[in-house]
Amino acid sequence: MKLGRNFTNTFVLDKLSKEDQNKVLSGEYDLFSMNALGLIKFKKDISSQIKLAKEFDLDHIELDGDVPNPYPDFSKEERKRVREEARKEGISLSLHLSYSNAGSSVCSLQELDRRKAVELQKVYIDFASDIGARYLVMHPGSAPFYMISEIYLERLEKALVKTLVELGNYAQERNLLLHLENNVAFDNIFVEPEKCIEAVEEARRQGAEIYFNFDIGHWFTRADCGKDVPDEPERVMEKIPKELVKELHLNDYVPKKITFHPPLHLETGPLKKENLKRYFEIVKKLEPELIVLETAYKYLDQVKDRKKILEEETAYIKELMRNAQL
């Protein structure tokens, strides 16, 4: 089983000029400004991400194709270079498709919008194919609060399945495995694993090879939308059919503070060590090919201590995986 990362914003600071780095470290610029200044630079430098993967003894990196990103503008030569470097270093690749802006229209009830979103995602799938990626991850799209009714939800699911079939077949032709990932609760739809599984299974009945990537941290956001998070929340994964699993995202969430992807070893969210022990026992039964960590930094002290935090978290997760004989 491979262990990888989406590095999110954890090393964006290193792509800034010295002047801008000092402004971030002094608190003059907040972390949103740090991301605005350096995120595209970090995403573009895939070589540095491969080097980071090697440094942290990882097998895989997941590139973040959400807006903003530089990937559609990569030349054929740049794509070939990424493919060759990743292969040389023994690092496998996946791509998270765009899920905001136009990318969120994959389940749009307006067919014109849905088709445009599909066309957009195909651009990213072509990029993933060109760099030799194996896995793709997409979100189910979002819907406004006034569409949260039974009839609307049925129509949204129908539109999503249509997209899954089109993109799943397109990906399969390019030797890529497409995954549907559950939304955060603030997207209003496709938060619960059951609804995502329902859409995936319908797409598979229509001939597409689609998988389900369960993001447990996304599921925890239900706590800020009036739903409970049980004492042993990892047991929700027992609902997932094994045949739908190739890749899983692992991250946490801090309810009430609305903090996404905190470092797992700090135990600030629902996933304490005992929970993660049970999580990996369930994972062992599901037999995924890949687990992707998605830690992100929300506080300045984390950015200042960026390398140590990831070193400690990686060691923590690797120990839990060894204990589970993964």
Image (cartoon, rainbow, N blue to C red):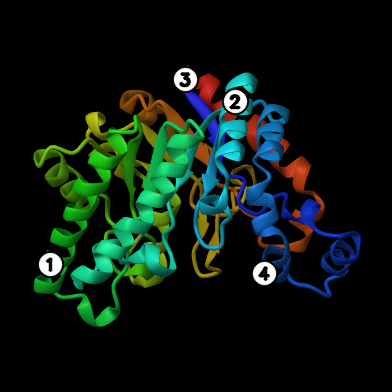
- Answer whether residue 191 is visible to the viewer in this image: no
Task: Judge depth for marks 4 and 2 and give the one in front.
Answer: 2
User: Which tag is nearer the camera, tag 1 or tag 2?
Assistant: 2
Whether residue 265 is visible here, answered yes or no, is yes
Q: Kindly state the secondary structure of the residue where label 1 is placed.
A: helix
Sequence-first disc among 4 and 1? 4
What residue lies at 67% left-to-right and 69% top-to-bottom?
32
Which residue is disc 1 drawn over? 155
Residue that extends furthest to the top in the rendered view of this protein:
325
Residue under numbered circle 4: 32
Precedes in sequence: disc 3 or disc 4: 4
Of residue 198 and residue 239, the one placed in the foreground of this image is 198
Amino acid at dot 1: Arg
Circle 1/circle 2 CB separation < 8 Å:
no
**Amino acid type, label 2:** Glu
Residue 84 is labelled as 2
Q: CA distance from mark 3 to mark 1?
A: 40 Å
Q: Residue at left 43%, top 49%? A: 124
What residue appears at the point 51 percent right and 57 percent down from the top-left corner?
253
- Residue 326 — which label? 3
Residue 85 image position (x, y, % from top left)? 64, 27
In the rendered view, would you say 101 is above or below 118? Answer: below
The residue sitting at the front extreme is 76
Left or right placement of residue 170 versus residue 92 in this view: left
**Which numbered disc covers residue 82?**
none
Which amino acid type is marked by label 3? Answer: Leu
Which residue type does callout 4 highlight?
Phe
Q: Quadrant of residue 59?
A: top right
Across and down, in percent, residue 68 comes to: 56, 62
- Most distant residue in the bottom direction: 146
